[in-house]
Structures are given as structure tokens and as C-alpha cells.
Amino acid sequence: METLRSQNESLGIEVESLGIEVESLRMKSAEQEAKIKYYEEQIRLAAAKKYGASSEKNVSPEQLSIFNEAEKESGEDAKEPPLEEITYKRKRGGARKASSEKYDGLPTEEIHYELPEDERVCARCGGGMKEMGTDVRDEIAIIPAQIKVIRHVQHKYVCKDEACADEADSVNIVKARAPEPPIPHSPAGASMIAHVMSRKYSEHVPLYRQEQQFGYNGIDIPRQNMANWVVLGAGLMEPVYERFREFLIGEDYVHADESPLQVLSEPGKKATSKSYMWLYATGRFRRRIFIYEYTRSRSGEHPKAFLRGFSGYLHTDGYAAYNSVPGVTLMGCFSHARREYVDALKALPVDAEKSRALSAEGLAHIDGLFELERGYEGMTPDERYAARLEKSKPALAAYKKWLDERKRAALPRGKLGKAVNYSLNQWDKLKTFLEDGEIELSNNRVENGIRPFAVGRKNWLFSKTPNGAKASAVVYSVIETAKANGLTPFFYLKFLLERLPNIAAGDTDALDALMPWADDLPDEVKNPAKSD
């Protein structure tokens, strides 16, 4: 009996041990299955990003035909539009005008075709012919860029009275005043430096290509010279850059984002390591400013230092580095929250109907908020604030309830789970838009602003030195702020490079007169087409 009891106890222990082992194996199997599903999601998402549409909206067929565009779009039955149908966009305001208005500022050249006197004879009766009118055909022509030398000749004057020189023991010579050049002892004038900067940073043409293009016109300008002009010209514009920052710090709303940048010759860093270009922008209801800043790292110390003195709303994508900025209210980005659901849908297998439905539900909640925002267009910030409390607040509450209910249903390591957790973790920042009618639902304003830098980076790939990266930040800031205020980058750069050498250091009033939103900017900057 004792032996049987002992055997039963031993068997019970063995069964219990086997049960624990089975449960452990079951948990490991579930964990492995979750990992497999997670990696399958990553593979499907990577494939979707590589072979599918690059954005979250459908790509039209027209966007896919880049290289065969001329052949694809041409046709024998295509009719040329009359000149009055071709629009000319004003440099300020952006409105499209009718032909009678839109070409007023453009120079017009008339070519008259007249019969010689000996041909003004009637073929039927032999009598003389008189002019009865004209037929007019307008065509648009373009004159390629012209390069010329502007020779500045300063005339000098001396006193005629010889006694004057004898009394003072020196000759009194006066020289006519001439404007200071942007770069002393350099042949590059303001227009040349502005051209190189605008081509590189606004049109994304690297310096080596500009060197080639100058060569095609018989002009030898080495890229090294152009690089020096960019760096020295950017140094000249630093007071404008700093003034932009002072105005931005004084605003109530700032958007922020960052993008990697490779700088080859940074002390203490490998050439392959990442540096960063940060972008700060004002809200759309305020003075329009875009400021780039180059830094060696992505540390939170950089936005903390740059935004020192700012105490308003800071709109970001949720990157933790911005949490170190003191005295600000952080705002979240619903576009990033939406992107998580889009990625989840791309990563799901075909047969994952339940997860697909849940992802679509989350997406629908956020799309509903954006749809409400579109209905607020044209409202003042106060009207927008009231409309949000009436309509957006209940929609936001419904989304929060859905998130709380669905959190446990989502795969912990899956893309859907990540999408749900992103919104929940960012909730306090996401709901901030209800506090003020000027706050945006997304951080797209600054993301759109950093896109020109990303496009340019694909063409010129890297900066060689920190000085070059800093210069790029200054020039990008000037160009994008000019664009945001309706100015043409080339003419605004030229204006600054002409004026800045001739104003005193620390003259804030003179600097403010150079700002792109200044009321008394010359017409050649505001409306260059009219200034010819």
C-alpha cells in the first residue's frame, strides 16, 4: 500500500511537471507564431514600400510617366491653346489672371511685316495699295540666361587749388561712393551668387552640373569657386537668418521636424555617420517663417537650445527628443497616427479579414477628423475653435473609446497593435488641437517644408564639411521663407546680397526692412516681371 501511494505521488509530480512543460512549450509556440507573423508583416510592408505607391494616397498614371511624357502626351489631334488660355502666375499672391492682365508686366517685342513699296501695287488694275489693318499673332519666347561683366568705375576727384595742398601738406582726394560687394575681392556679384544658390537649393542642381552648364556657354567657373561663394554668401546672410529665428521664437505656434544628413569631414565622426538637418516653421495663421538648423546629432539638446525663449505650442511627430524642450505644450500629429494604420493594412496578409477590418475602422476614425477639418476651411481661428468643440470633440471621444476597446484585440507586436498603441501613447498630445483654433491636426506643414531639402539631398547626396552644412541651412531658410511669402528665391537672394554689405552691423530696423513680409520691399523683389 505504501509503495502504491509512493508511485501515485511520483506519477502526480511527473504529470504536473509534464503539464508545466506543455504549457511552457505552448507559450513558446505562441511567441514564435507571433514573431513569425510580425516578420511576415515587416516583409509585406517592405514589399509594399518598395513596389507600391510611396505615399498614402493613390498615385495617378500621369505621375508614372516621366521619361516617356513627351511621346505619351503628344498627338496629331492636339490643338495649341490660344495665348489667352496660357496662364501667367503672379509672383505675389499666386492668383491666375486673364490674358489682358497677366502679361502687362512682361516685355513685349513687336516684329512688323510690311510689303515693300514696289509690291504695293494692285495685281488686277495696277493701282497703288494702302494699309487697311493688321493681323496679330502672339507667341511666347524665352531668352537663355546671359552672363555679362559689370565694371564698377569709381571716379576720383582732387582739389584744383594748389595752395590747399601746400597748406595741408597733402592733396585732398575724394572718391565717388560705390556699393560694397557681397564678397570682397571676388568677381562674383550678387546676381551670380544668387543664381548659384537658387539653382542648387531651390532647383536642386548640384554645383558640378552648374559647372558643366556654364561650360556649355563658354564660361569657365570651377565648382570650388561656386562652393566658396555659397559659404561666404550664406555667412553674409546670417543676420537675416538670426532675425528669422527671433521672430519665430516670439510666435505662439511652431512646427518641428528633422531629417538625416551626411557630412563627410566632421571632426571625431566617421564619414558614414548621420548628422541632422532640423526644420522649424511657424503656423499657417502667423508670419510665415521656415528655419533649418544643421547639428551633429539627433539629441534633444538641439531643439532645446534652438527654441530657448519659446513658450507656445510645439507641433512634432512624437519624437521623444522634443520632450526636453522646457515651457512648451507639445502637440501630436494625426497624419503620423493615420500612417500607422496605412502601414498595418499594407502589412496584413490577404486572409486577415478581422485585422483588416479593425485597421480600416481606426483609419476611418482619423479620416473623419480630417474631413471635419476640411469643413472648417475659411473660418477664423475662433470660429474653428467653436466648430471643433461642437463636432470634432465628440468624434475624438468616439475614437478614444474605440482605441480602449480594441487595444487587447490587436496583436501586441503587430502593426495594428503598434498603430493602436501609437495613438494611445500620444493621446495627450493628439487631443491638444481642441485647445486652440490655430493648431493644426497634423505636422504636415513642416514635413512639406523639409521635402525640398530631402529632394536636394538626393541630387547632391552629402555636405563635405560642417561649414557647408551650416551654409546650406542658412540658404534653405532664406529660400523657403521667401517662397512661403510669395517671393521668387533668386530675386530675394539677389536683393539681400546687394543690401546686406551696405548696412551697419546690429541695425535691427535696417534688417527688418529686408524681411520677406516687409511692406516696402522694392517692386523688383515683389514683382520681378513688372520691374523690367
Image (cartoon, rainbow, N blue to C red):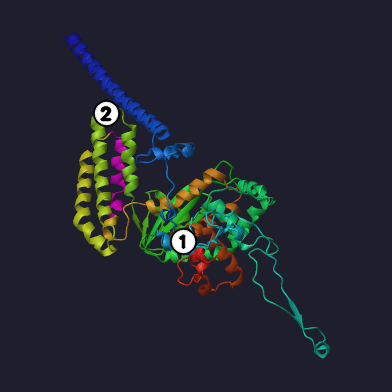
The residue indicated by pointer 2 is: 352
In the picture, residue 53 is in which quadrant?
Answer: top left
**Start-end of magenta stretch:** 411-431
Q: Label 1, label 2: how many angstroms apart (C-alpha)?
A: 59 Å
In this view, the residue in front, 333 or 520, is 520
Q: Residue at x 47, y 53 (%)?
A: 278
Q: Give the image location of residue 311, x and y in percent.
A: 38, 63
Secondary structure, mark 2, is loop
Marks 1 and 2, the one that precedes in the sequence: 1
Q: Give the image location of residue 237, x and y in percent.
A: 56, 63
Name which residue type carries label 2: Ala
| Magenta-drawn stretch contains 486 | no
Residue 405 shown left or right of residue 334 in the figure: left
In this view, the residue in front, 177 or 330, is 177
* 456 w.r.t. 239: above or below: above
* 309 w.r.t. 171: above or below: above
Q: Are marks 1 and 2 in contact (CB under 8 Å)?
A: no
Name which residue type carries label 1: Tyr
On residue 450, the disc is none
The residue indicated by pointer 1 is: 103
Secondary structure, mark 1, is loop
Q: Is residue 353 visible?
A: yes
Q: Residues within 10 Å of mark 1 (few under 14, many from 20)?
A: some
In the picture, residue 440 is in which quadrant?
Answer: bottom left
How many dots with numbers?
Answer: 2
| Quarter of the image that includes the C terminus | bottom right
* 55 w.r.t. 450: above or below: above
| Magenta-drawn stretch contains 414 | yes
Q: Residues within 10 Å of mark 2 (few under 14, many from 20)?
A: few
In this view, the residue in front, 411 or 284, is 284
Q: Is residue 66 visible?
A: no
